Image (spheres, rainbow, N blue to C red):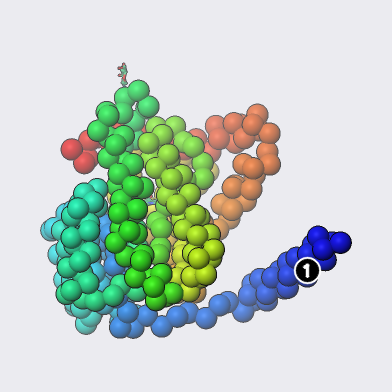
Amino acid sequence: MFIVLEVLLLTLKIIAALAVDFYHLFVPYPKKDVSGKVVLITGAGHGLGRSFALHFARLGSTLVLWDVNTEGNEETAKQVRELGTEAYTFTVDVRKKDVVYETAKSVQDKVGTVDILFNNAGVISGEEICNLTDSQIVRTFEVNAISHFWILKAFLPDMIKRNEGHIVTIASQAGKFGTPRMSDYCASKYAAVGLGESLHSELRVLGRAGVKTTLVCPFFIDTGMFTNLSFKTDSILKQDDAVSTIVDGVLRNKREIVIPSKHNIRIMFKAFAPFSVYDLIEDFTAINVGSQSGKYD
Ligand SMILES: NC(=O)c1ccc[n+]([C@@H]2O[C@H](COP(=O)([O-])OP(=O)(O)OC[C@H]3O[C@@H](n4cnc5c(N)ncnc54)[C@H](O)[C@@H]3O)[C@@H](O)[C@H]2O)c1
Ligand SMILES: *[C@@H]1O[C@H](CO)[C@@H](O)[C@H](O)[C@H]1NC(C)=O
Ligand SMILES: *[C@@H]1O[C@H](CO)[C@@H](O)[C@H](O)[C@H]1NC(C)=O
């Protein structure tokens, strides 16, 4: 008897949730004010990380910039300061957990509480499975996935205590589709997707939904990360467009951002299509990521 009532109640809640979703198709959620907020970005010395920094600088946020590449990071800081906001740089290899924990303490001392955290640093190898070196495999997992845990352990407890803050996980569509010569990258991005989803569920169960999460899954972007790439039916995303879409979504507390959004159809197609058909489509789109010529060695 009770279960019937519970299912009825659930049905009503689902209808209400769908109505709210439908309404927000036409009236987007408002953007939050991030002026004066502290935004920490890993991998801030190049590509998306630098663009995120400049976008938040224009919105009046204070930037905390982490990168293993000091020179690139300082260049980002310079461009942020030219926009009239503060930037604090830290040279950090996010793979080194002790360095992450110590640097997090200096951030707390020098800058204060972090409001928005971008787990953005990432690397790609671009080799067939048997040609990946052992250290490439470990590096890809450490940078693209495991480092997220060190950084979360450093900053999440404070956000949970305050029931406020925002974690942005920069994953990839490589976390939705397995791809040739991307096995280490895809596996690490699937890990990041799993972490991003679990983080969201965990915060809800803890009654800490005030801490927002955004999981980001873009297609290829012209940041220069991929130097040896070809495909037939798609076009590479422009860095500025991708970053504008991501920042807009973060400001509206979007839970997941797939770019381009039409690739949601591809994600659904993969779930429903017979494998035989999926293989044919995969051959047709011919996504081909080749060796990155040892660019991180
Ligand atoms: N470019 C794309 O096509 C694309 C597509 C989907 C997702 N992504 C993801 O977006 C994120 C940013 O990519 P991008 O295109 O800006 O790459 P990028 O190579 O332009 O920049 C990555 C930055 O991360 C830094 N970094 C690398 N290893 C680090 C480490 N161990 N510690 C600290 N910093 C480190 C690099 O120094 C660099 O400044 C990555 O996670 C990437 O996987 C990129
Ligand atoms: C990959 O490894 C195989 C066997 O070791 C070798 O024959 C081949 O040339 C390698 N391919 C590349 C792209 O390095
Ligand atoms: C591109 O990748 C292919 C396949 O891994 C490789 O054979 C080729 O040398 C790469 N080209 C460059 C310029 O790195």
Q: Quadrant of residue 48?
A: bottom left
Q: Identify the residue shown where x is 36% and y is 65%.
A: 156
Q: Name the spot of residue 255 as percent of width and height, x first.
A: 52, 64
Please tell me which residue lies in front, 173 or 16: 16
Residue highlighted by disc 1: 9
Q: Is residue 160 above or below residue 33?
A: above
Residue most extreme to the right:
1
- Left/right placement of residue 93 relative to residue 281 reads left
Please tell me which residue lies in front, 42 or 106: 106
| Amino acid type of the residue that numbered disc 1 sits on in the rendered structure | Leu
Q: Identify the residue shown where x is 23% and y is 51%.
A: 97
Please tell me which residue lies in front, 71 or 6: 6
Q: Is the CB atom of the residue marked by disc 1 within 8 angstroms of ligand 1's nearest atom?
A: no
Q: Name the spot of residue 257 as percent of width and height, x first.
A: 50, 60
Could you tell me which quadrant the C terminus lies in? top left
Q: Identify the residue shown where x is 35% and y is 23%.
A: 130
Q: Is residue 82 visible?
A: yes
Q: Is residue 278 above or below residue 72?
A: above
Numbered marks: total: 1
Q: Residues within 10 Å of mark 1 (few under 14, many from 20)?
A: few
Q: Quadrant of residue 102?
A: bottom left
Q: Please, what secondary structure does the residue beneath circle 1 have?
A: helix
